[in-house]
Every structure is written in C-alpha cells, then in structure tokens.
Image (cartoon, helix red, strand yellow):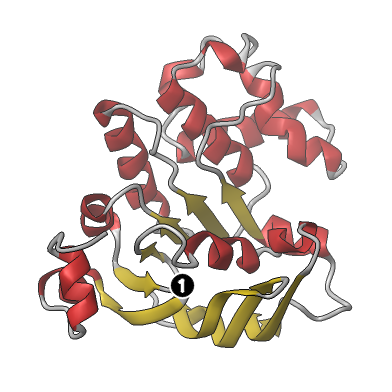
Amino acid sequence: MSQENKITIKDFSFYYNLVQALRNINLDIRSRGIFAIFGPARSGKTTLLKSLNRLTDLILGTRHTGMILLDGMDIYDPKLSLTHLRRRIGMVFELPTPLPISIFDNVVYGPKLSGTNQRNRLNEIVEKALRSAVLWEEVKDRLHTSALRLSGGQQQRLCIARVLALEPEVLLLDEPCSGLDPISTASIEETLVRLKRDYTIILVPHNIQQASRVADRAGFFLNSELVEEGTAYQIFTKPRDKRTEDYVTGRFG
C-alpha cells in the first residue's frame, strides 16, 4: 500500500453559526487504503466527511478555519473549481439514491453531463464502473431496466458505480450500510476492500465492528475533536486514550 498522504488536514475547525462542530483537527490520510472515522452521534464525523468535498458550502451560516489539502492543494482556494473538486472526491450517502431511470442511465448520468456521448465509450464506462462496484455479473443482462427494481444492497453498489464512473481519486462514504441486511452489508464491505487498491476511501462506518473489519487506519472522534488515530489494529486492540478504550469496549456510546 502506498504510504504518501492523499489528504492533509491542518488545524481545521468548523462552525454552524455559533456551534462548533469540529475543533482543531489535524490528520493525514494516506493514498489507497480505507480510513474509518468513528465515534458517537454528533461527534463531527459527517461534518468532516462533507467538508472534504465542500458539501458544507450548501449550508447557510457555516465557516471554517484551518486547511484541507488534496495532494498539497488547498481545497478552499477561491480559484478552485468546485465541480472539479467533487469529481476528484466523490460521495456516497447513507441511503441509496438511484435515479428513477435505467441502471445504464444511472451510471452514465455524470459522464454525459461532462460531455461524454459516444456510445462505445459510455458502454465501456458502464461495464468498468459496475465491475469495480462488484455489480456487473448481477445486472449485465438487465442494464436497461429500472434501477429502482434492484435490492437495497444492489442500489447502494449502483450508487458507488455512479460515483466511480466519474473516475474520482477519493471516495467518501457516510454509513453506506446503515439500512442494509447482513448479506448486502457483506457485499458492500467486500466491494470496498477491492476498491482500496485503486482509491483512497474515507468511511463513516455503520458500527465499530464494520470499522474493525475493513479499515486500514481509523480515527476516533468525540465532542468535535479527534481523540486519537492510528492503524485499525492498534485503535481497536490497544487504544492509547482511555476515552477510545471506553468507546471501543462499549462502556459508553
């Protein structure tokens, strides 16, 4: 696994009006691996995730201090194209949100908006994205049927494929298995472990067990602060901070 840092977060704080949601976060996230952000509700996990591709810009009254660097580039640089940033850093949400169109049209939606219209190229994009999301074999004979006829787990993998069709470098996932059954959850986890060979994945997991199964590194958040981060093995078996240990062992949370 490559060891260089894909994302560097420096002294980053975030505010919703007067409420501080993140407090002085310093964190390096390495290329090509799964980094899990875990902790109790309202600890700042989703705010950090949404800050990484500036979805927080859509909320009135927000502000930040500090920096987030993507390959050394400040993502809050006023000259930066937000469209370009969100192509490089794609996001998959908690609930699967397929568009009410065919499986094929879901995957090519982004590339078509970006000007790709050649049929052969679109066919290539669809097969590659669906293979990457470990969905191709299940849907290759019904690409032109409605995406809404897929199961919940298949819909979530389709949403991953839709992001992958734009060829991002970073994938953000906010509890992508929260509404899924154990078999679908296992499929998503298997997909993520395959994808980390080519992508940097930042995951807010459904629970601690999921984080311990799939993450290479992890960070524990509590009360808007990053308490500690390290390898998943160290965090989940030998945490350095008593607060992490209490949370991991189920004493609170």
Q: How many numbered badges does the structure rendering display?
A: 1
Residue at position x 82%, y 31% in the image: 118
- Looking at the picture, tell me which residue is in the foreground, 19 or 65: 19
In which image quadrant can residue 54 be found?
bottom right
Quarter of the figure that contains the N terminus: bottom left
Q: Say which residue label 1 marks.
A: 31
Q: Is residue 126 left or right of residue 101?
A: left
Q: On screen, 185 above or below 27? A: above
Q: Is residue 213 left or right of residue 172?
A: left
**Image location of residue 58, percent across then percent down:** 78, 57
Residue at position x 49%, y 32% in the image: 156
In the rendered structure, which amino acid carries the disc numbered 1?
Ser
In which image quadrant can residue 231 be found?
bottom left
Secondary structure, mark 1, is: loop
**Image location of residue 166, percent across then percent down:** 68, 47
Residue at position x 71%, y 17% in the image: 101
Q: On screen, 137 above or below 75? A: above
- Looking at the picture, tell me which residue is in the foreground, 55 or 249: 249
**Image location of residue 198, percent across then percent down:** 46, 58
In which image quadrant can residue 48 be found?
bottom right
Q: On screen, 13 above or below 138? A: below
Q: On screen, 226 above or below 140? A: below
Q: Residues within 10 Å of mark 1 (few under 14, many from 20)?
A: many
Quarter of the figure that contains the C terminus: bottom left
Residue 196 showing in the rendered view = yes
Q: Is residue 53 left or right of residue 180?
A: right
**Image location of residue 106, percent across then percent down:** 67, 27
Residue at position x 23%, y 77% in the image: 243
